[in-house]
Every structure is written in C-alpha cells, then in structure tokens.
C-alpha cells in the first residue's frame, strides 16, 4: 500500500515537470483555427507577429499571406495562436480570402490597453 502511494506521488511529480517543460502554443479563447482536416495540409508559413501595447487604445495586426510571393495552392489551414495569458488575447477575424483560396487577410484587434502576440500558421494542399 505504501509503495502504491509513493508511485502515485512520483507519477504526479513527473506529470507536473513534463507539463512545465512543454511550451504551450495556444490559449484557446483568443485563437483562430480554420482547417480542412480531410486534406493533408503542408505547413508553408509560421511566424510570430506582435503589436505594442497602447495605454488607452487598441493594438492591431494586419496580416496578409502570401507575403511578397505568389501562391498557387489552395489554403487548407489558417491558424492564429494567442501567446499571452488567458484573458489577455485579441480578436482575430478573416477579412478577405480564406480557406480554399490562394490568399488570406486577417485582422487581429487587441483588448483596450493590451498588446498582441500571435503565432500565425498557414498550410496549403500538397
């Protein structure tokens, strides 16, 4: 019985240690994820975008893809992952283009007095 308790405590400690060593990519409340999981998407773009905090106003990110190139494949996955703590994210919205299109424009608006930090990912068909 005592060895079972020790094993249980050790497994709990191991779970805590491993959870802290993995960096979270997302805070779901403020994320944008629009994907066609039937296709086999190929990640073609991933970068972190930031916008500084404005004391009394909102911050914005205007994201457009493709950047300085021409895309010939349909977009199959659009993701914008908030990197701030829960409650401190922004509001992403697709303005033009999108899934099954060749381009996409996303506008992310922060909460008043907050900044933005998002990992943007775009995947296309093979």
Image (tube, rainbow, N blue to C red):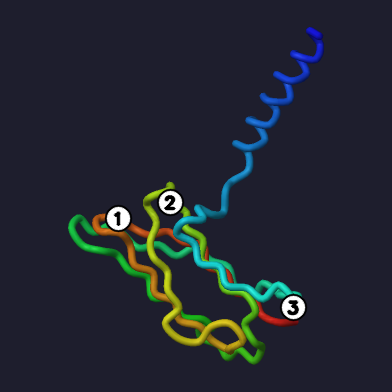
User: What residue is at 24 percent from the left and 55 percent from the top?
Assistant: 113
User: What is the number of callouts on the image?
Assistant: 3
Whether residue 81 is visible: yes
Mark sitting on residue 6: none
Q: At numbered mark 1, what does the secondary structure look like: helix, strand or loop?
A: loop
Q: Position of residue 118 (x, y in %)?
A: 46, 61
Quadrant of the rendering where the C terminus is positioned: bottom right
Relative to 60, 48 lies left or right? right
Whether residue 63 is visible: no
Relative to 109, 79 lies left or right? right
Q: Could you tell me how far apart the alpha carbons at marks 2 and 1 are, in whole angstroms?
A: 10 Å
Q: Closer to the camera, 96 or 48?
A: 96
Q: At numbered mark 2, what does the secondary structure look like: helix, strand or loop?
A: loop
Q: Is residue 76 above or below residue 28?
A: below
Mark sitting on residue 114: 1
Relative to 56, 100 lies left or right? right
Q: Is residue 86 above or below residue 14?
A: below
Which callout, 2 or 1, points at the residue further toward the start of the chain? Answer: 2
Q: Closer to the camera, 99 or 83?
A: 99
Foreground: disc 2 or disc 3: 3
Foreground: disc 3 or disc 1: 3
Mark 1 and mark 2 in contact (Cβ < 8 Å)?
A: yes
Q: Residues within 10 Å of mark 1 (few under 14, many from 20)?
A: many
* Residue wearing tag 3: 39
User: What residue is at 68 percent from the left and 31 percent from the top?
Assistant: 15
Quarter where residue 17 is shown: top right
User: What residue is at 26 percent from the left and 64 percent from the top?
Assistant: 58
Q: Position of residue 101 (x, y in %)?
A: 58, 88
* Residue wearing tag 2: 84
């Amino acid at each position: 019985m005592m060895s079972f308790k020790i094993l249980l405590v050790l497994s709990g400690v191991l779970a805590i240690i491993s959870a802290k060593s993995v960096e979270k990519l997302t805070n779901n409340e403020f994320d944008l994820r629009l994907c066609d999981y039937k296709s086999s998407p190929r990640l073609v773009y991933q970068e972190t975008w930031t916008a500084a905090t404005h004391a009394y106003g909102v911050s914005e990110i205007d994201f457009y893809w493709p950047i300085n190139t021409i895309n010939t494949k349909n977009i199959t996955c659009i993701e914008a992952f908030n990197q701030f703590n829960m409650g401190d994210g922004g509001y992403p919205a697709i303005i033009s283009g999108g899934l099954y299109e060749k381009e996409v424009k996303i506008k992310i608006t922060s909460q008043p007095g907050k900044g933005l930090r998002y990992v943007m990912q775009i995947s296309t068909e093979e």
